[in-house]
């Protein structure tokens, strides 16, 4: 029986390529690499949207609230064996006026919503929460510094505290991407994974997933 894994995230799941503003190829993006490395018996689907938040409505762009799309996403891919959520980076933008603890509460609300979609799961809710690698300290000197604001680096560095707590309390699996050896952001903006980091994330998940699905 083929197992379905849904990767629900933002631009770092979509595969945004900050060096040229394009998108990494299917041979380079971590969800595609994950499916390749897991081999037969797994179907990995990409649900990455640039700018997506956990639960916050963006006043500048529509359709980016993860809470508003998680139901339809899960149901369109049912039966789901594992949901991977890697969000939080966009929540650190100044225009949302929230701190890392608030973002953790947003994640908790999103996860509870996913758990509640009973008809989407093959057997039972099975969720892996990934804290995204933090925004690099060089971000404030890049051409896109105004998009996120002044406090995004500190907020992103503290997300793991609250995300790990949410995972523990809600019975989810957990991974801190920032702790993966060698993972890094491209120096064009310091907030998007470079090509090598997509590979490293996929390899780490390949080690984890057979034990939890």
Image (spheres, helix red, strand yellow):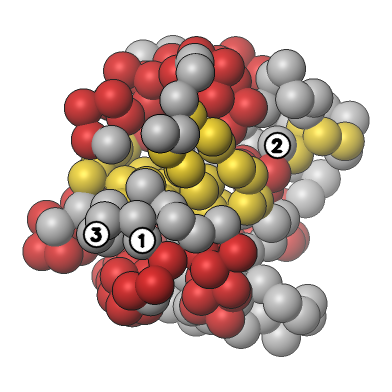
First of labels 2, 1 by sequence position: 2
Q: Is residue 164 left or right of residue 203?
A: left
**Residue bearing the label numbered 1:** 121
Residue positioned 37% across, 47% down in the render: 82
- Crowding around mark 1 (Cα neighbors within 10 Å: few <14, some 14 to 19, many 20+) is many
User: From the viewer's perspective, is the residue at label 2 or at label 1 nearer?
Assistant: 1
In the rendering, at what x and y percent does residue 34 appear?
Answer: 52, 24
Lower sequence index among marks 3 and 2: 2
Whole-angstrom CA distance, mark 2 to mark 1, is 26 Å
Q: Is residue 13 left or right of residue 180?
A: right
Q: In which quadrant of the rendered image does the N terminus lie?
A: top left
Q: Residue at horizontal 69%, vertical 44%?
A: 14
210 above or below 15?
Answer: above
Q: Camera-side residue: 154 or 63?
A: 63
Residue located beneath label 2 in the image: 15
How many angstroms separate mark 3 from mark 1 (CA)? 6 Å
Do the residues bearing badges 3 and 1 touch, measured as CB atoms within 8 Å?
yes
Q: Secondary structure at mark 1?
A: loop
Mark 3 vs mark 2, CA separation in Å: 29 Å
Query: Does residue 121 appear in this view?
Result: yes
Q: Residue furthest left?
A: 169
Q: Is residue 76 above or below residue 190?
A: below
């Amino acid at each position: 029986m083929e197992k379905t894994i849904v990767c629900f995230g933002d631009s770092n799941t979509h595969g945004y390529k900050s060096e040229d503003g394009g998108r990494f190829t299917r041979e380079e993006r971590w969800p595609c690499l994950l499916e390749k490395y897991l081999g037969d018996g797994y179907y990995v689907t990409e649900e990455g949207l640039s700018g997506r938040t956990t639960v916050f409505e963006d006043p500048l762009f529509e359709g980016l609230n993860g809470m508003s799309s998680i139901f339809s996403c899960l149901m369109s891919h049912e039966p789901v064996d594992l949901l991977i959520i890697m969000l939080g980076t966009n929540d650190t933008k100044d225009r949302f006026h929230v701190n890392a603890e608030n973002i953790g509460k947003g994640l908790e609300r999103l996860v509870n919503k996913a758990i509640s979609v009973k008809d989407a799961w093959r057997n039972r809710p099975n969720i892996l929460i990934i804290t995204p690698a933090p925004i690099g300290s060089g971000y404030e000197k890049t051409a896109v510094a105004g998009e996120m604001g002044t406090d995004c680096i500190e907020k992103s560095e503290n997300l793991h505290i609250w995300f790990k707590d949410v995972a523990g309390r809600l019975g989810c699996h957990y991974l801190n991407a920032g702790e993966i050896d060698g993972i890094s952001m491209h120096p064009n903006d310091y907030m998007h994974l470079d090509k090598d980091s997509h590979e490293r994330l996929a390899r780490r998940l390949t080690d984890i997933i057979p034990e939890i699905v």
